[in-house]
Amino acid sequence: MMEYNSYQKKIVPYLDGSLPKDEASEFEAFVLTHPEFETQIKNKQEEILLLKNLIPVAHLSKQSAESLKNEMHSSIFNLLKEEPKGLWDNVRIKWEEWINR
Amino acid sequence: MKRKDFFQLVLPLTEKLYRFAYTLIPDDLQADQLVIDGLNAYLLKERKSILRREIDLASKKETQLLKRALYKGILRSVCDIGVRRATQMNEHVKNNLPKDYTSFYALDPKVRFVISLRYEAQFSVEEIEEIVQMPRYEVIEKIHNGRFLLLNDLNKGVSL
């Protein structure tokens, strides 16, 4: 019974991903031998699904996504300046800078 | 890593980053700006280590791991800046919260971010610890509290 209770307490951490890997494998092995546990896990999984529906999933329109990508592109271009390693690298960087003007 | 490799790895994350920014500030323009500011802060901090890093883009596994690391790094900056901004949301944003998500936006900004990382993007608790820079017990506490408050609001009740 003690063992049963301790595994019962592990359902949420197991679904949360907070259970250490070795304990998670142990838990999975226990569930295989105790089918009634599956119902409890299923209930918790439904709860998680419900939670997912309560979290907003914002979508960008094609135009907004393009515009945000362009802004990110400029940020990366301006802040991630490469140091040339030799003449050809210098030419490559200058070329990239020219086409990205 | 070359700048073009960074473009290739980070630009496909645009929409995902925007979603997280929106969980903190539910306003299109401000969420957009938060993504840019988070990226800028990350680049300013990590520029040298990014450029120093050797990468073989032919290796799928290595590419995936690096992409995940960059994603988490930028999310860390978005979280840092966004949580501060979300606590000072202006009246316009406060009065125009998305109607279907009022319970979600009633939560503390950091709880919102953690809950989204866990349930929306399915990051592990260890990864969330890394992103939000909080000890594990605090992450777990925020996940539990957020879950309880959200479900309680739906009169479902939850046993913690």
Image: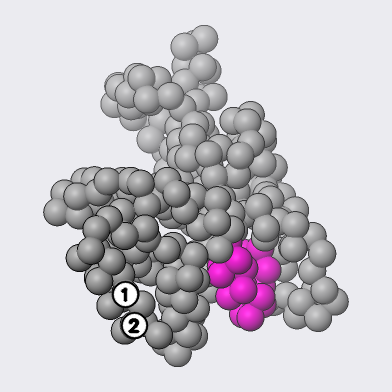
Return the mark for residue A98: 2
Residue at the outermost left position: B58
Residue name at image x 44 percent, y 62 percent: A80
Q: Is residue B105 above or below residue A39?
A: below
Residue name at image x 79 percent, y 60 percent: B87
Left or right, A9 with respect to A91, comes to: right
Q: Chain of mark 2?
A: A
Q: Which residue is mark 1?
A: A94
Give the extent of the magenta segment. Answer: B20-38
Quadrant of the rendered image containing residue B105: bottom right
Looking at the picture, which amino acid does disc 1 mark?
Answer: Lys
Q: Position of residue A66 (x, y in %)?
A: 42, 84
Q: Chain of mark 1?
A: A
Quadrant (top left/top right/bottom left/bottom right) for the C terminus of chain A: bottom left
Q: Is residue A86 above or below residue B135?
A: below
In terms of secondary structure, where does tag 1 sit?
A: helix
Residue name at image x 79 percent, y 69 percent: B89
Relative depth, front residue between B12 and B98: B12
